[in-house]
């Protein structure tokens, strides 16, 4: 049977059909609709119909979402706040007329990258999505960890560690201040630049200007790399993964893969002994497609 995966992101929603051998058979990407819950359901239903009309049915269906399902079957912790408290899985099953497997989008990313991506063969993989929001997943020997609360890998909603005296602590939609997400996500990077240097540049525009030699934009990227290094050093101290994989829009900033490992040793616990950090920091091998591929693999559990 083919496998349909759908990745519900903050700005785009993507669908892919994988054959039994993992080869891609079909792909479609649409803008994520407005904040209305009903529009989100309609967009997902449209993608399922389009895959069927393209002749790829029968297929299993897996969906990667921000946030996670509670044991009662409602969504929680989604930065797409219209999903919170809603029975998304139940409503989708009713809409598309077949079983639907659901998983946190970061768990989809880590499954994809631990299966046949940048972390393939590594015993412990930590994969972080850094885009509109920030989340992460953990895979051990190819198995995704979830936990009894569905919170394994919820790295983005811990406070940024080793905070500097003048460092901001922006409010987060979760109700707290200074979460990692508010400072290392794409909007967080843009907000930091605007606060320090003015203007209304996006993260992508800041990266482009920095490459062209713009000094304020280069300073913003250095502050961001410093914060990400501290945030990931805390992961290494707790989990000691073999590989850390980055996905999401911010992961396309190539300087991170040199600059962050050059910095994180200052916070990785060494007991005063000079010892290099052996954890590898890598971009997602499947790039933007990794989350949707992971959703397709998870879809095989639907039923």
Image (spheres, helix red, strand yellow):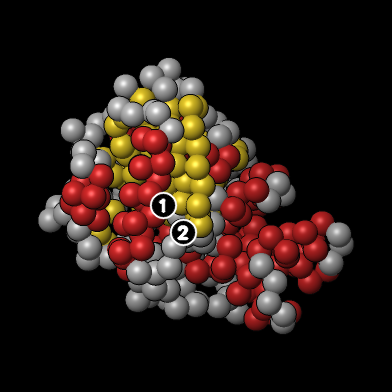
Does dot 2 land on a helix, a strand or a loop?
A: loop
Q: Which residue is mark 2?
A: 32
Q: Position of residue 73 (x, y in %)?
A: 16, 54
Please report the residue visible at 80 percent of the width from the left and 63 percent of the height from the top.
209
Depth check, front residue: 137 or 289: 289
Residue 278 vertical placement versus 268 (above, below): above
Quadrant location of the N terminus in the rendered image:
top left
Location of residue 103 by image quarter: top left
Q: Position of residue 299 (x, y in %)?
A: 31, 34
Q: Is residue 176 visible?
A: yes
Q: Which mark is residue 8?
A: 1
Quadrant location of the C terminus in the rendered image:
top left
In the rendered structure, the answer to whether residue 165 lies left or right of residue 22 reads right
Location of residue 292 by image quarter: top left
In the rendered structure, the answer to whether residue 293 lies left or right of residue 228 reads left
Q: Nearer the viewer, mark 1 or mark 2?
A: 2
Q: Which mark is residue 93?
A: none
């Amino acid at each position: 049977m083919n496998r349909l995966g759908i990745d519900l992101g903050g700005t785009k929603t993507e669908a892919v059909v994988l054959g039994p051998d993992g080869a891609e058979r079909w792909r479609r990407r649409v803008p994520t609709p407005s904040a209305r819950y009903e529009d989100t359901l309609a967009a997902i239903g449209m993608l399922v119909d389009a895959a069927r009309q393209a002749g790829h049915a029968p297929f299993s269906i897996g969906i990667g979402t921000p946030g996670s399902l509670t044991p009662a079957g409602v969504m929680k912790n989604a930065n797409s706040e219209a999903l919170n408290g809603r029975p998304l899985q139940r409503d989708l099953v009713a809409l598309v007329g077949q079983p639907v497997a659901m998983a946190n989008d970061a768990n989809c990313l880590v499954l994809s990258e631990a299966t046949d991506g940048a972390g393939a063969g590594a015993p412990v993989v930590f994969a972080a999505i850094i885009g509109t929001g920030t989340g992460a997943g953990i895979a051990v020997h190819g198995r995704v960890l979830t936990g009894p609360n569905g919170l394994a890998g919820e790295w983005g909603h811990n406070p940024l560690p080793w905070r500097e005296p003048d460092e901001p602590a922006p409010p987060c939609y979760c109700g707290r201040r200074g979460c990692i997400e508010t400072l290392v996500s794409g909007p967080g990077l843009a907000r930091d630049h605007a606060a320090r240097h003015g203007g209304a540049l996006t993260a992508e525009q800041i990266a482009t200007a920095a490459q062209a030699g713009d000094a304020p934009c280069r300073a913003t990227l250095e502050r961001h790399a410093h914060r990400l290094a501290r945030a990931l050093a805390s992961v290494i101290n707790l989990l000691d993964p073999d590989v850390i994989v980055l996905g999401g829009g911010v992961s396309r900033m190539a300087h991170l893969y040199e600059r962050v490992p050059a910095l994180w040793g200052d916070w990785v616990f060494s007991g005063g002994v000079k010892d290099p950090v052996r954890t590898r920091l890598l971009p997602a091998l499947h790039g933007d497609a990794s989350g949707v591929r992971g959703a397709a693999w998870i879809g095989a559990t639907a039923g």
